[in-house]
Every structure is written in C-alpha cells, then in structure tokens.
Amino acid sequence: MENLKSNEANRVLAQKVIEAISNDNWEYVNEVFAEDAVVWVAGSMPISGTHTKDFVIVAGKRTREGFPEGLSLTAKAMTVERSRVAIEAESLGNHISGKTYNNHFHILMEIKDGKVCTWKEYMDTMHANEVFFG
C-alpha cells in the first residue's frame, strides 16, 4: 500500500511540474527541484549535456524570452514506478524565430523526498536545434 501512495504522490508532482512549465511558473519548477538535482538533455545542441539545478532557472528565462506568447507542454502519458516517472509529452508554441516549436518528448524524472532529483529529456533534437539555433 505504501508503494501505491508513493507512486501516486510522485505522479502528482510530475504532473504539477509539467503544468507549471506550461503555465510559465518556473518559480514552482525551481522550488521542487532538489538543490543537487541533475538535468540531462539529449543531443549535441548548445543546451545538451549534463547540468546542475541552475539550468532550470536558465531554461525558464530562455523559454520566457523565446516564447513571448507562451509554450505549452502537455503530458500525453505517464508511467510511475517508485521514484521514477516516465512521461511522454508534447510541446507547442511560436518561437521568436518565427518557427513553430512542436516537439515530442520522453522525460524521465526521479523524485526523492518530494523533490525532483533527476531530469532526463529526450526529444527530436534536429527540430529543437532548427527552431532554437537554426
């Protein structure tokens, strides 16, 4: 029974993080990431690689600047197993480059003690690179 409660709490937190990103509430995202959180982004783009929690603040700033009309991030499916939450998600927004950013993601969050301690983000990196840096 304890695992079911833990699974549900982790699912709810993961959903809140996704919704906060979609609602431009980066303050909440920053609040629920552990101080020693590790963020990893797939690919070979300038934003790819392993980062510290500071990357969350930078991501929020870049999102606000790059998507003045907002960027939606929608969870399409979630699978929870103990501390790990796997999320299939889709983004949609108009970037300042004039291009539409409609990407598909797999995000793996690891949650411990009510905080996100690991975020791994897989996406169509060619599309992201073209919109953000191309």
Image (cartoon, rainbow, N blue to C red):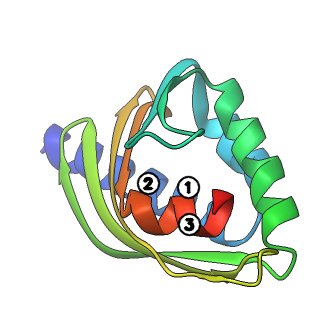
Task: Point out the tag, 3 or 1, that comes first from the N-terminus.
Answer: 1
Distance between the alpha carbons at the discs numbered 3 and 1: 26 Å
Whether 123 is drawn above or below 23: the answer is above
Residue drawn at the location 12% of the way across and 45% of the way down: 1
- Circle 1 sits on which residue? 17
Instruction: Out of 6 and 17, give the one closest to the viewer.
Output: 17
In which quarter of the view is residue 73 placed? bottom right
- Dot 3 amino acid type: Glu
Q: Residue 74 appears at what percent x and percent y? A: 47, 77
Q: Residue furthest front?
A: 134
- Circle 2 sits on which residue? 14
Distance between the alpha carbons at the discs numbered 1 and 2: 5 Å
Instruction: Out of 122 and 86, give the one closest to the viewer.
Output: 122
Left or right: where 78 falls relative to 75: left
Q: Which mark is residue 130?
A: 3
Q: Residue 31 appears at what percent x and percent y? A: 70, 37
- Crowding around mark 3 (Cα neighbors within 10 Å: few <14, some 14 to 19, many 20+) is few
Q: Residue 118 appears at what percent x and percent y? A: 41, 30
Q: Label 3's element?
A: helix
Residue drawn at the location 54% of the way across and 58% of the way down: 129
- Dot 2 amino acid type: Ala
- Dot 1 amino acid type: Val
Left or right: where 134 falls relative to 74: right
